[in-house]
Image (cartoon, helix red, strand yellow):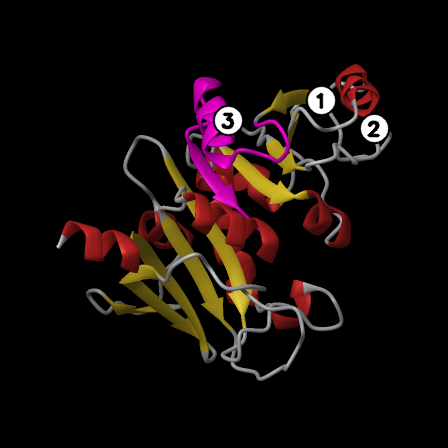
Amino acid sequence: MRRLLPSPTEDLDDAGLVEAYRLPPGRSLRMDFVASPDGSIAVDGRSAGLGSPGDKRVFRVLRALADVVLVGAGTAGTEGYRPVAPDSPVGRLREAIGRPVELPIAVVSRRASIDPSSALVTASTLVVTCAAADADRRAALAEAGATVLVCGDDDVDLPAAVAALAERGLEQVTCEGGPQLLHAALSAGVVDELDLTIAPALVGSAQRLLPDDLPAPVGLELRQVLEEDGVLFTRYGVTATSSDQVESS
C-alpha cells in the first residue's frame, strides 16, 4: 500500500498504516465505509463484495485504534458481528500498539430489538437505545450482560449517545454503519471524519452510502489518500454544513 497524499510514500507496513490513521487524544467520531464510485455499499446485500485485502488491513487498523465500535443493529445482524477475540488479528494488533485487547461494541437500536441470546451480547457490549424502546427488552439485554444506554425519548439522540460513551472513557469512536446511521450521525453533526474506501467497480445497488437527502450538504476536507491495487483509501475531515457556512459569512 502506498500513500499518494500527503507526502507520497511507498510500501506502508502495519506500523506505518497505524500512524497514518492515528488521531490526537480527545473525543472523535469517524465513519468507516467502503463504496463503489456510483455510491453502492454492498454486493448481494453485504459490504464484503466490495472489500479487498487492503480494505481489511485498514478495517483492522481503525478497530485497533478505536475505544469503541459503533454500529447499527441492522448492519450488525447482516454482517454477523461478534465480540473481538483477543487472539484475532484485531486483538493482536491492539496488543501490539499498547491498546486494551478488549474492544467494546456499541449497537444502536431504537427498539432495543437485539436478541439477548445473540453471541454479540456480552459484558463488553453496549446497547444504545431510547426511552420509547420496550422496557422488557431493555431489561432482558441488561440481564444478559449488556450495558443499556437510554439516550433520547422517541428516537436515539446521537449527541447524547456520544457523550455517554465518552463518560465511560470511550472517546474515540469508529462507526461502521449502516447508511441510516451515517445519515443520522451527519444530520446530528457528530461526525468528525469519514474514512471512505473507494472500490474500483460499478455496482448499481439500491443500497447507497446515503439513502436520503441530508438537511444540508456537509463539507468534506480531503486529508489523506492511500492506494493499493486500484483501491483508494481516503480520509476526509467533516467541516461545516453549507447552511453553517452561510450563517457565519
Three-letter amino acid code at the position of disc 1: Ala
> Is residue 166 on the magenta stretch?
yes
Image position, residue 22 (x, y; %): 34, 44
Which of labels 3 and 2 is toward the front?
Answer: 2
Q: Is tag 3's residue or tag 2's residue first in the polypeptide sequence?
A: 3
Q: Is 209 located above or below residue 71 in the figure?
A: below
Residue indicated by mark 1: 146
Question: In this view of the protein, which residue sits in the foreground, 228 or 205?
Answer: 205
Residue at the spot 59% in from the left edge and 45% down from the top edge: 89
Image position, residue 14 (x, y; %): 42, 53
Image position, residue 48 (x, y; %): 67, 65
**Tag 2's secondary structure?**
loop
Residues under numbered marks 3 and 2 in contact, where contact means CB atoms less than 8 Å apart: no
Q: Which mark is residue 116?
A: 2
Question: Marks 2 and 1, how far apart in space?
Answer: 8 Å
Region in magenta: 152-177
> Is residue 13 on the magenta stretch?
no
Residue indicated by mark 3: 100
